Amino acid sequence: MDVDYVVEGSVRRSNGRVRISAQLIQVSDQTHLWAESYERDLQDVLALQNEVAGAVVKEIRNRIAPEIRLIPAKTPSVDPGAYESYLKGRYCFGMISREGLWKGLEYFRAAIATEKNYAPAYAGLADCYWKIGQLGLLRPIEAFPNAKQAAQRSLELDSLFADGHASLASVAFYYDWDWIGAENGFLRAIQLDPDLSVAHAWYALSLILLGRFDEASVEAQKALTLEPLSHVSNIVFAAYLQFSGQIEAAVEHYRKLIDLYPDFFHAHTMVAMALLQCSRFDECIESAKKATDLSGVLYPMSFAGLAYAASGRRKQAVEVLESLNLESRTTYVPTVFLAVLSLRLGRPFLAFNLFERAFEDRDSNLVILKLLPMFGISRFIPGVRKLVRRMNFP
């Protein structure tokens, strides 16, 4: 392992007090270079965290890296209950699952109910809402406006809060289709907090979808370095591999992510898409069915339909399309991939009706239009070209 020094720590809480212990260890001979403990009231936990972080950076600077510069941080007090609800909400959001996202909303609302001017909770609320809209768990025209309102409120309370800028940038990209505004928002978030992994990850994903793969590579790898076990960092890195043409490597990375988090339905969905690209049709169908079973979200089955069509099983492909169209009359089903399946089956009139419905719904999946060749569909079909122009793609 290419590590020279390690910071170890522990946290203990009792009777409204919290104690953090930290130590700096030299790996080569396990020498303890520095150790200290800090204790405060629980309501000052953010100040305590910053104090410990500052002390650790100071010791690293003094002992092994004098070039590191200390930057003062604001340390507002926060109600302990609100902070605990916020942490639980962030944990649930990080799972990127149906249950996790809805539960995350509950925790962030609880934090706001306790601490009404708590900017991080509003950013968390925004993240849950826009991700719910992106994954089709709620109609985009219901989810994204709530996300935008929460992100704006977060920044009203703290204009320098990096998470709030990243949240608002995500809404700008997937719902407003404001490509320049989104990029500026992601860059502002990264400027304010260079170690915010989700900002690098969401920015990387936006670059991927715009076909800017060299830049996306840098951001995706940065996110993965910052949080190597994160659902988000891993799926974005795998998406970079997939959409940049490294399909087999992408499949391998998705498989490793699924081994780590077997119930992560979004990973099953994305690997189904990758398996479709490399003509592993039966595996694609299996993964698409698994994603649907895990989540109750129906659109992953469109990849099974595409796999049936590509492998000559037209009857099964038509059955998938008709079933999803029927379900969409009573349940929200993102229609972009149904439109793609319709094109693949030679039904352009249905396809463009579905694309039009997706446009009216502000379906965030329309951002894949520039990457349609990966499904064997030309971007230059007149109806598709018209949509690309209406969305003002750069």
Image (cartoon, rainbow, N blue to C red):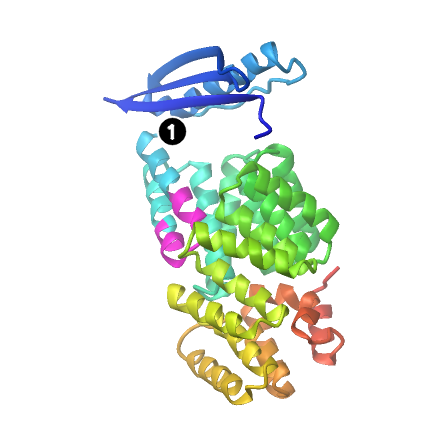
Residue 394 spot, x, y in % from top left: 75, 59
Majority secondary structure of the magenta segment? helix
SS of the residue at dot 1? loop
From this view, report whether residue 383 is shown above or below residue 155. Answer: below
Q: Which residues are magenta?
A: 89-103
Residue under the point 59% across and 10% down = 63
- Looking at numbered disc 1 in the image, what kind of residue is underneath it? Val
Residue 250 falls inside the magenta stretch: no
Residue 177 spot, x, y in % from top left: 64, 59
Q: Which is more toward the observer, 200 or 386?
A: 200
Q: Does the image show residue 130?
A: no
From this view, report whether residue 394 is shown above or below residue 315. Answer: above
**The N terminus: image quadrant:** top right
Q: Does the image show residue 93?
A: yes
Quadrant of residue 262 within the rendered picture: bottom left
Residue 206 spot, x, y in % from top left: 64, 53
Residue 31 spot, x, y in % from top left: 49, 12
Q: Which is more toward the observer, 252 or 111?
A: 252
Q: Is residue 177 left or right of residue 296?
A: right
Residue 95 falls inside the magenta stretch: yes
From this view, report whether residue 197 is shown above or below residue 3. Answer: below
Quadrant of residue 332 within the rendered picture: bottom left
Quadrant of residue 344 within the rendered picture: bottom right
Residue under the point 48% across and 82% down = 320
Residue at mark 1: 78
Quick one: label 1, few (<14), some, or many (20+) residues within 10 Å?
Answer: some
Residue under the point 57% across and 63% down = 364
Outermost residue on the bottom side: it is 315
Q: Which is more toward the observer, 18 or 143?
A: 18
